[in-house]
Image: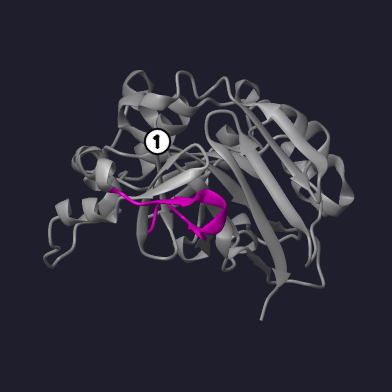
Amino acid sequence: MNICRFNGDRLGLVEGPNVFDVTAALRDLPAPAWPYPPGDPLIRHLDAIRTAIAAVRPRAPAVPLNSVTLNSPVTSPTKVMAAPANYALHVSIDAQDPGVNHGLHNKQLEGVDRPVDKLGLFLKASSSIVGPGEGIALNWLDRRNDHEVEVAVVIGKGGRDIPRQRAFAHIAGYMIGLDMTVRGTEDRSWRKSADSYTVFGPWLTTADAIEDPEKLTIWLDVNGEPRQKSSTGAMTVGIAELIEMCSHIYELHPGDVLMTGTPEGVSAVKPGDVITAGCTGLGEMQVAVRGKG
């Protein structure tokens, strides 16, 4: 099932070229009571919402997918976790570019087979999240801003110290993610957390629809020119182990997002560019780039 949020506050079921407006299914969300439970309410109650979607689908109006504004399917994660340098060719090719490494990041990675073991994961501000229809507003126009396409894993069932053998049972679904990055020497969490620097979409593909998330092809074009393309099978540390690692440090909550790393081919973007990012089984999204303000 492909579930989207569109036009700000509408819930949609994506089928082919159409979005069925199933916002009525949100009536099954319980009224919040203080203190609000942590996590994303849609993801926390996803099983009930899916049942409600199926019930309202026969009466739901359809609109063309290309006529709506797609927002992030996840609205309230307690955290966005990200794995740095998790593709070997990204390390051996991109990280050797002085415009990327600034004389610092390549040295961090010298002789390191599994950068996640050395660097850990980093956090991105939840306020940086947008959907593809909202676009990217570059915050540092005087510096190099790069695209990084990734598979984003949405946690469905929370917990701590989740063993990798049970990790996939904690996944609600998957999205395409853009981890936008300004290059420099500052901490990753600073350089990647400006407003609009985390793009999620085009919709949430539920976990049961993806047979093997580590056999997906991800790709990204800028203005129609290919820039990135790889298989998630090339990740240095796989999804289950990443969940095991981060749940050892953080308690995971429904709606938390794990960004799994980007492959080789990152490059700069500027205002006026259009990014097209896609992944087998997860769809395709277009994202316009503009300047801040």
On the rendered structure, is 208 left or right of 273? left
Residue 273: x %, y % from top left: 78, 60
On the rendered structure, is 39 left or right of 84? left
Residue 136: x %, y % from top left: 64, 64
Q: Residue furthest right?
A: 98
Q: Which residues are magenta?
A: 60-77
The answer to whether residue 73 is magenta is yes
Along the viewing direction, whichever of 13 and 18 lies nearer the viewer: 18
- Taking the spot 80% from the left edge, 63% from the top edge, the residue there is 270
**Vertical placement of residue 104 versus 283, above or below:** below
Residue 139: x %, y % from top left: 68, 72
Along the viewing direction, whichever of 136 and 191 lies nearer the viewer: 136
Quadrant into which the N terminus falls: top left
- Taking the spot 68% from the left edge, 56% from the top edge, the residue there is 181
- Taking the spot 52% from the left edge, 47% from the top edge, the residue there is 202
Secondary structure type for disc 1: strand
**Amino acid at the residue labelled 1:** Gly
